[in-house]
Amino acid sequence: MNAGRIIGATAIALCLIVAAPLQAQDKGKDKPKSTVTTKVLLENDKVRVTETTFKPGDVSAGDRRHRVGYALTGGTLERTNKEGKKSTVERKAGAAAWQEADSDVVRNIGKSEYKVVTVTLK
């Protein structure tokens, strides 16, 4: 009887060990991993200023606060919101744009590198 309990407990433990990585993989499928390069130019208790580089095909995924973006170079971006709706945005070099907080997935669908300086208030 004790051997049966030990075998049963071992079987349950093995199932849990195998199932845990599978659950973690499923959660990661919802949003692609960010591939952009972001450099912090200034950060203090009031503001965060970053320079982000999107190479062609690069993706930025994550929760973002309200912010101002200043395009150093022009580019064509595809934004996908959490409902799956896609929109295309053209950014011209030297243009500034206000953006509301979002968790969109942003992809550089252009043929050239896109660089933007972003100012986010804390």
Image (cartoon, rainbow, N blue to C red):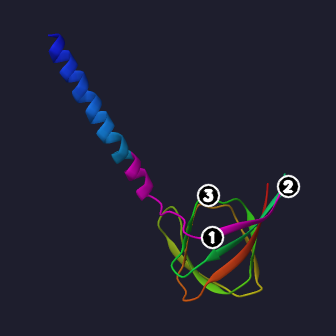
Q: Which kind of residue does numbered mark 1 sit on?
A: Thr
Relative horizontal placement of residue 86, taking residue 46 as reference (left or right): left
Taking the spot 70% from the left edge, 59% from the top edge, the residue there is 65
**Which image quadrant: the N terminus?**
top left
The circle on residue 87 is none
The circle on residue 37 is 1
Count all numbered tags in the image, as a single digit. 3
Q: Is residue 31 magenta?
A: yes
| Secondary structure at numbered mark 3 | loop
Cβ atoms at labels 2 and 1 below 8 Å apart: no
Relative horizontal placement of residue 17, taking residue 88 as reference (left or right): left
| Secondary structure at numbered mark 2 | loop
Task: Residue under label 2, please give it.
Answer: 46
| Secondary structure at numbered mark 1 | strand
Taking the spot 20% from the left edge, 16% from the top edge, the residue there is 5
Foreground mark, 1 or 3? 1
Task: Residue under label 3, please give it.
Answer: 63
Taking the spot 29% from the left edge, 29% from the top edge, the residue there is 13
Q: Which kind of residue does numbered mark 2 sit on?
A: Lys
Range of the magenta residues?
Answer: 24-44
Gap in angstroms between the C-alphas marked 1 and 3: 16 Å
Nearer to the camera, 18 or 67: 18
Nearer to the camera, 63 or 16: 16
Instruction: Answer with mark 2 or mark 3, whichever residue precedes in sequence.
Output: 2
Instruction: Answer with mark 2 or mark 1, whichever residue precedes in sequence.
Output: 1
Residue 51 lies, in percent from the top left, at 72, 72
- Residue 113 lies, with reference to residue 11, above or below; the image says below
Q: Is residue 51 magenta?
A: no
Instruction: Answer with mark 1 or mark 3, whichever residue precedes in sequence.
Output: 1
Foreground mark, 2 or 1? 1
